[in-house]
Image (cartoon, coloured by chain):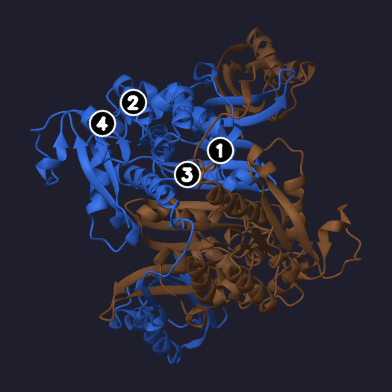
Chain colours: A brown, B blue
Amino acid sequence: MRKCKIGIVGFGTVGSGIYKILSSEVDSHPILKEIEIAKIAVKDLNKKRDIKLNTNLLTNDPFKLINDPSIDVIVEVMGGVDLAKDIILQSLKLGKSVVTANKAVIARYGEEIYKTASKEGVYILSEAAVCGGIPIIEPLKRSLKSNSIKKMVGIINGTTNFILSKMTNEKADYKETLKLAQSLGYAEFDPTADVEGHDAADKISILSELAFGGKITREEIHSEGISKINLKDIEYANKLGFEIKLLALSERGQINSNDSLALNIWVGPSLIPKSHPLATVKGVNNALLIEADPLGEIMLYGPGAGSGPTAASVVSDILNLHAASVKNNTIDPLLSFYFWRNCHIIESSQINKKNYLRIICLDSPGVIGKIGDIFGKNNVSIESIVQLDASEDKAEIVVITHEVNNGDFERSKDEINSLNEVKIIASQLSCI
Amino acid sequence: MRKCKIGIVGFGTVGSGIYKILSSEVDSHPILKEIEIAKIAVKDLNKKRDIKLNTNLLTNDPFKLINDPSIDVIVEVMGGVDLAKDIILQSLKLGKSVVTANKAVIARYGEEIYKTASKEGVYILSEAAVCGGIPIIEPLKRSLKSNSIKKMVGIINGTTNFILSKMTNEKADYKETLKLAQSLGYAEFDPTADVEGHDAADKISILSELAFGGKITREEIHSEGISKINLKDIEYANKLGFEIKLLALSERGQINSNDSLALNIWVGPSLIPKSHPLATVKGVNNALLIEADPLGEIMLYGPGAGSGPTAASVVSDILNLHAASVKNNTIDPLLSFYFWRNCHIIESSQINKKNYLRIICLDSPGVIGKIGDIFGKNNVSIESIVQLDASEDKAEIVVITHEVNNGDFERSKDEINSLNEVKIIASQLSCI
């Protein structure tokens, strides 16, 4: 099968993440071997890098990649706006499909870029531009296309979610937590784009165009950030059963007399009931809830940033392009399924897992000790062992183990069952 | 553009859901208009139906559809095993791609079906067979293919999750709740497949084949159901900070000397920490957590069954097939993006939303009444108004409104701000 040759522009965290995936010996799908890195454009040829690269791959002229007829796909992961936009548009105009992780460029110049790609009969894919590793753009383009999207609401900025999570859990104040986020690399030196909601507005703009099909004027999106949130609000919200999160929302309205669909789009700090699925999104994670007709409500959740997740999304886009190009003569290797390896199921006794056990026994002193001894002898380490509900001569003991070998656990269970003090093992459950 | 002609076999809840999507006048993507229902095979031609159908569409012989050369895609939504399997295999052998929602057939005869499709150069798509409306199979085939999947764990049976949720929330016992689930149509007359975990085992078998690439022997999957769970376990688990859910798990092990990948697969009732994302999955919803390298952990969440969600997944598969077939001469309309309508953003004053307001005011009697009056006069209905933290001459009042018009709300805010008793409106947040 013909290989797909790619040129990577930019070799920072995302670029090197892509290199790692494509050169990895990890047990992954064989189609990854069909992607070949032909050239990498970097700013400084002499920079020291952690990754050992064949220096023949490197150039400091990104336009060399664009003009190389042997390269099928340009992967723009350099960041920034103006040069990145030029590289994307030039590549499309020369008939090359482009994969990008650049949300700032797509949110600002989407219309020109989409139109150029359509005109040239090539693709612009940008899964990594919104919510890092979570598949969101592809579902909007494919799985959800049978639906009419009604509403999207989500946590789509990891930096602010990290800060709000910390403020909630540790009652730490905003400025302090922002400093911590900066020191951990979760917030930039100038954090404005994140904390004032501009980054989330870029992303909800891109998602809204994909979901509702029309051009969005990015500047019209009202966004408010988290810099004015104080601990009191978080405390009161918690008391009342809510979490405070920075939400982005986009919702379908009516079609007006000019045949234009009204959209309600905003970014702002919001209260969410604690039982709401978005309330459990902690730290730098992202999640998007999509309400659609007739589908109902789905949520997509995962890491919103980071080298590995972002690179994985970029490589998925590359695979999609490769599949689309080979399809002319054969079947789409992403849409079809074939067995490509052998698998077998592990015997139950070889599995490791966490366990919950409820034991009904006589309420006699020392029984917890005896049970503990049996587990210890069998290498079963215990997370907690609690006596509950002692009444008359009966007591109930609940044990939660760490992740342990199933064979060891079953052996312990048999021994516990044979203790004189034990009446019955009433329940056994798995834990995660 | 050439239309995609489909033949639907079976016209129960899923079949009629498909018909509704394709004949709907709802504002949805224009590509849906390219799908045409050519023929529908039903058991009983004379059955009364809620949907008005052109009777020329109907036949009671499914093989008429398969043998009709004008039909491009066969949609098998009749259910059952033996006849459904024959229809799927026959269609593939005649060079027709097939979309199915039939997990029992795919879990049992997947190998034969996948091989036949590969050999004939056509597709078998089955998004609706696992977790109804949640895009899971497509992400495994596409977005996640750049990763090495390490583990999948999830709640993939809606019936048992409904029962366990009810037992937890209402301290209702198992048998009672099962009866309720049956009366609501969430559980079948013979509930064995659901409550004993067999349905979840079918699904995790299909997902494991897609994620790990090898054939799974369905019968080797150990599954345990929820029929032995009693209220005591739920009570204790809750006390210790856990929820009890029926989980399906599939995890990568080592590759053995025969070059076969070991897999740890099981279905069983399990404890989940309340803070875990899977713990918030309530009622008949499903969710799957996928751990992958280098992606990290993502979760896909949504409705696991139902006419609308299942039909939406079937139609997505049809669109994928249509896109794959038109691609030979033109660009893939699912992979590309173009603006297909006008959109505009709603003015802020026209938006409806829920609000949180924190007001610092004098601790004087009647101030809550005055605030309430102002909201009432402006049509702002209030969910709760609470006085917190009164000290010396100062009190803080927190108001949470229902979903109200933003203009009405802002007007109220201005009036409240001008009350003599009000010192400052300290915070304003959105609520969902």
Check disc 1 and give the amino acid type: Lys
For label 4, count other residues whose C-alpha is less than 10 Å away and answer few (under 14), some (14-19) or many (20+): few
Q: Work out whether A224 lies above or below A330.
A: below
Label 4 to label 1: alpha-carbon separation: 61 Å
Query: Which residue bears the numbered disc 1?
Result: B239
Task: Please state the horizontal and vertical placement of residue A124, each as a whole percent of the image.
Answer: 56, 64
Query: Which residue bears the numbered disc 2?
Result: B90
Q: Work out whether B225 lies above or below A325.
A: above
Q: What residue appears at the point 63 percent right and 31 percent down from the top-left corner?
A: B251
4 vs 1, front mark: 4
Query: On what subunit does the disc labeled 4 rest?
Result: B
Compared across the picture, whether B24 is left or right of A150 comes to: left
Label 2 to label 3: alpha-carbon separation: 39 Å
Query: Which residue bears the numbered disc 4?
Result: B67
Query: Which residue bears the numbered disc 3?
Result: B281
State yes or no: discs 4 and 2 in contact (Cβ < 8 Å): no
For label 1, count other residues whose C-alpha is less than 10 Å away and answer few (under 14), some (14-19) or many (20+): few
Check disc 4 and give the amino acid type: Asn
Q: Work out whether B410 lies above or below A3.
A: below
N-term-proximal mark, 3 vs 1 = 1
Residue A308 or A425: which is nearer the viewer? Answer: A308
Q: Work out whether A203 lies above or below B9.
A: below
